[in-house]
Image (cartoon, rainbow, N blue to C red):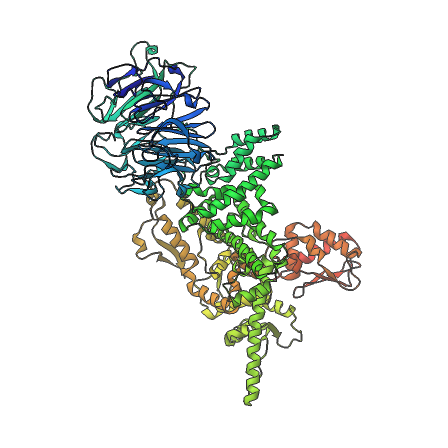
Amino acid sequence: MFCWGKNNDDQLGLGETEEEIVTRPRSVGEASFSLENIKWLSCGWRHTAFLTKNNAVYTCGNNDYGQLGYEKEGCQPEHVTTLDTHSITQVSCGENHTLAVTDQGLVFSWGDNSCGQMGLGNAQKMNITWPRMIKHLAKMTIVQIACGANHCMALSKGGYLFSWGENTFGQLGIGSTANQSVPVPISSLDGVPFGLICVGGAHSFALSTSGALFGWGNNEYGQLGVHDNKVRHMPTLLRSLRSQQIRYVACGENHTAALTQDGGVFTFGCGSSGQLGHNSDTDENCPKKVFDLMGSAVTQIACGRSHTLAFVPSSNKIYAFGKGDSGQLGIDNVTSNSNSCVQVKGPWSPQRGNPETGYRVLKMMAGGDHCFVIADKNNDEVDGPADLRDELPVQPLLTLSESYTCDLVKEASMESDPRDTFDTLETIFSSQACLNGSFLNRRLDEKVSSRVHGIELPALRRSFLRLGAIPNEHIKGAMISSIAHYLIPSMLQHLPPDIEALRVYIILPEFEMIRSKQCFNDIVIPFGNSILRLSAEANKVLRRWWSSLPSTYFSNVLKLFQDAVRFMLQLPAPSTPIEIGTRQTDLNVCMEALSLLNKVNAESGDIVPFKEFYVPEIQRVVDIRADYYNWIQNENMFSFCRFPFVFDASAKTLLMQTDAVMQMQSAVDEVHRRNVQSLISMAPSTPIHPCLVILVHRENIVQDTLTQITKSHPVDLKKPLKVIFVNEEAVDVGGVRKEFFLLLLTELLDPKYGMFTCIEESQTIWFNDLTFEESPMFLLIGVICGLAIYNSTIINLRFPPVLYKKLLHRKPTLDDFRAFKPSVARNLQYLLDYHDDDVEDTFGLDFQVVREKYGAVEKIDLIPNGSEVKVTAENREQYVDAYIDYNLNKSVHKQFEAFSMGFHRVCGGRVLDFFHPQELMEMVVGCQEYDFKIFEKVAEYKGEYYDRHLVIMNFWDVFHEFPLDMKKQFLAFLTGSDRVPILGMESLKIIIQPVAGGEHGEHLPVAHTCFNLLDLPRYPTKEIMKNKLSQAIQYSTGFGLA
């Protein structure tokens, strides 16, 4: 071991010597212990404490305040025998006091107590000569300690920070400036997982496991690095270092040094003695990289009062800068300051000749105005130089990793009374900080940020599954109890001070054990409440993290709150007003949490299918029609209708029908009112029909419909639709209405009108911006779509999904365009993904589109003066947005607005906003979720037919043997559409009746599409059935787009 610097109080431990200054590193020589046995030491301003490998403490130096732990002077390191009954793991020295922590987490203090830095309370005397246990920390299990000039800080294994002593500059971080004689919690940092604490003269720092650095206290010289010189009484994040991946911090009296993951060194604070190493003596209140050290990977740093050390292992060199009046820079016979890096002249420097003559630096320490180095003779059996970037010299808080979890599970399974495992898991699951520091991905290329949570998700899931499989129920109960009684209350008590305190919101839903019934009230609902209480900024970060989750992890969060809702739905109905209020509050918490998840899912392009948000149990337990009525009356009360994304198709359809009945009833009531008013006034008038009656000729169906729709009052469109074909006697009980829609749309989609263009690639239709038809025709089609929904009729209108998104006033995206024109979308995506900078030369685009108009080429600007604006790497996103906007919005604005006006004239209302665009499309054109077993199950039979009749059994055998395409053709043959109503196959009821002409196979089956009725001859064999049914399907034309 080597030392240099000030020795006026024998703090170097050199024994009897007259030298008060040692300017060149000197071997300490043999003390009362073997030098090879030293594993760490701490330097105070005028004394030093040594920690041996067998966990004993030795001290030397000034003892005016009893800081050596014994009563005599210490020119050589002397054993602090009072601590022999304890195993010491760390020592720390202040200006005139000393702390030590044991392997059991107990803290002992001795020395100057003028500011309460002993932590023993006001009743204690000024100086404490012998180590005394700090009782106020006895229950906390401390793992780290740090001493400033006259204040102290401690970190518990549960991640809690404590401070005590002098507080003149707010260096205790508790928001006040009063000294504290006992440890007090720094509660504003609860939840942040700290790996290191460090204190200077009157300023303090805490470094998180992911490199977030918080500082507080004296800032007269800018030593907090927060871009000003204002004192901070509360912890403040050093935002400028957030992205630098800080791994270690050292503090001088009024300056600070920070070590990055890549071996860079930042310094800030007082520079009057050159201790910042910036080739100047000026102060810096903003962290600045030490230029002289750039290009070298530094692995250790240390600070004295006004000097700094840095170690570069690749060259085995120690560099120093700062104050040198006491030889603390280690330059032989030099006692001047240096504001640039100078090499410490020690025997470890590379030597010419035999490399075995030189020493290898292992560890270096500094404090006050003196320094120490622990070195060896390149002994391969000894670990190499310490790397503070990867392994701290102090114990961090308790956290879980996959390997550690495996060890804990193994111990819990093998030991009959695994007390240590019990205590460990109890501590971790009680603490936000412990969980927030668990399962971190150290190999992550991206830095932890508001977009990157840094959790190794697969390891997290595997580990929690292992913990859930522990056979020891006592341990499992302890984990649940810790979460319910300590973790969750702490999350409700304090808002997260930093993004790293938000990881628990990603981690906890992976713990399957909290999904049991007994956990919903105590854990899940309060957990949801804590999410809702987050600040706007924290909420934004959490939503970003949720959006980055793979679907299987996102689903776990979603199902957690869905299961809580299901749990409450199956509980007995509350009977008192208090119980009702509590139940509604708890339901509201879970529903609001689900609402946040739903927004994230929608904004992220469906991480999971939107249908995964359905909670069908709601409709089974709750009268959603009454819920809807109540919601209309008072939107501020709790109602499931505030969260329509949990309703499945059948629930939303029921609400649509409920709303339709309400509007129709309102229209009918208005009719009766007007009829009665006419009778009372005796004025001649024609009674108004309670239905919307449309009278049409088959040969003039479009014009007849347009004329009557145009003349209809908007309220009339809310009435039940009744269609009459002129000169036909059929009564409209649904079949005539269905035929009307089929015939009308077949006519409207005829190319002779030119209202739509067919997109062959996607097999869809879109508005023709060059059509000669006026707006009323598009309004008519919009009304027809609305009437089809209102009257529960599927129509064959193959618009792309983006149409329904536009009807719900949602902005189209590139993903929507991909389903519209796939090849064009691929080209746009290629433009966005192009990595080189030569976008302009490669693509040769400007902000124009070119199209053919009546045989001539037309160029249209996408933005003002678009022909003069070239598409570049910087503006290509704007180009894509403008291109999509033109194609889907601006070019067809007139046609779509008329269509939308017609649609909303019928369907506009609150319930329409309940629908997802996909659901709205399925309401109009049906869906493609086929279950043909149910199709058979709900079938009805007439005459002699029944489910076990030979002809019927042959029919179903043949049908189920058909490939899917053939089955879909049969649906089109039977119903006019190959799609299924949004309510599913249960609502698609086929009626089969016997007819003659099948005995010899001379007749084909006949479908009456208006009634889903199939005339099925009595075919004697399965072979004939298959042949005739196939012919009937293939010969049918149905109602297509063309």
Quarter of the image for the N terminus: give it.
top left
Q: Position of residue 471 (x, y in %)?
A: 63, 34
Q: Position of residue 182 (x, y in %)?
A: 39, 37
Q: Is residue 754 above or below residue 112?
A: below
Front-lying residue, 740 or 502: 502
Q: Residue at x 33, y 44 (%)?
A: 176
Q: Is residue 910 above or below residue 552?
A: below
Front-lying residue, 1018 or 178: 178
Q: Is residue 153 above or below residue 856?
A: above
Q: Residue furthest bottom?
A: 682
Res 774 visible:
no
Identify the image quadrant of residue 729. bottom right
Q: Position of residue 929 (x, y in %)?
A: 61, 53
Q: Is residue 65 above or below residue 983?
A: above
Front-lying residue, 619 or 843: 619
Res 357 visible:
yes
